[in-house]
Amino acid sequence: MLEAASEALQLEGLWFVALGALVAGIVRGFAGFGTAMIYLPVAGQVLGPFEAITTLMAMDLIAPLIHVPRALKDGHPGDVLRLTLGAVLAVPFGVLVLSVVAPEVFRWTVSLVALGLLILLVSGFRYRGAITKPMIYATGGAGGFLGGAAGLPGPPVILLYMASTLPPSVVRANNTLYLIAADVVVVTVLWWNGFLVFTALVLGLLLVLPYLVGNWLGTRIFRPEAELLYRRIAYVIIATSAVLGLPIWD
């Protein structure tokens, strides 16, 4: 453990990854989403695909737990369970894809998925119909596949809820609970298939500190009456991270 921690602390570019964790935590705190879309384009410039995803899952499992009591109160746990069941079925297929693609493909996928979701959200896309149970299961499955293939279990679910007419408090709560559950599923599948990198796991635990500080700051500055402003700020940060994460800048 100590040897892994020492190796993690000697990582070239550690400050850059820690900064990504801090900013991702701030956005997660006031917007309820965006961690992977901000952190992975940053981490992918320093770490390999499995290492980047492992660090994300390690820190993203612990720090957001401070939001769980409020999320359970505001959200719809039944829908979160359906999303999670869909993810359980799809994550293994995503991990299989990740195991055969090049690191550059991983970086392109992360950045382009983040930018694609951003374009849909900024365009004002809205789903006016009822959110049915089959739709929730399917969305969880899509999120699970992306979670295994690119470490991005959130975009399909974020799009579903943020394009709906549900209150912002419910959207934030459901996203928070689902992302925690999805992280557990992805970590379990990575471990089962032998892809869980121990050094990266330790690094992720070390990154909990800046990420937790970011979550706390984001929660402190969040004001429900200014929800639109916070969402726009999140959009700008996600776009910046995604563009800078593209391999073209190498």
Image: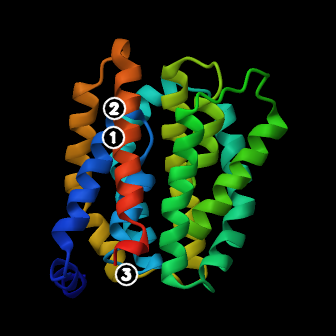
How packed mark 2 is, by other alpha carbons closer than 10 Å (few <14, some 14-19, many 20 or more), is many
Farthest residue to the right: give it: 134
The label nearer to you, 3 versus 2, is 2
Name the residue at 43% across, 45% down. Answer: 34
Name the residue at 54% across, 85% down. Answer: 102
Q: Secondary structure at mark 3?
A: helix
Which residue type does callout 3 highlight? Phe
Farthest residue to the front: give it: 248
For disc 3, the marked residue is: 198
Q: Secondary structure at mark 1?
A: helix
Name the residue at 33% across, 64% down. Answer: 42
| Picture layout, residue 66 above or below residue 22 | above
- Mark 2 and mark 1 residues within 8 Å of each other at the beta carbon: yes
Q: Position of residue 119 (x, y in %)?
A: 55, 42
Q: Earlier in the sequence, mark 3 or mark 2?
A: 2
User: What is the distance, in whole Å, between disc 2 and disc 1 at their CAs?
Assistant: 5 Å
Q: Position of residue 248 (x, y in %)?
A: 41, 74
For disc 1, the marked residue is: 27
How packed mark 3 is, by other alpha carbons closer than 10 Å (few <14, some 14-19, many 20 or more), is some
**Which labelled disc corresponds to residue 166?**
none
Observer-nearest of 208 and 146? 146
| Picture layout, residue 36 above or below residue 250 | above
Observer-nearest of 177 and 134? 134
Left or right: residue 94 compared with residue 199: right
Which residue type does callout 1 highlight? Val
| Picture layout, residue 28 above or below residue 38 | above
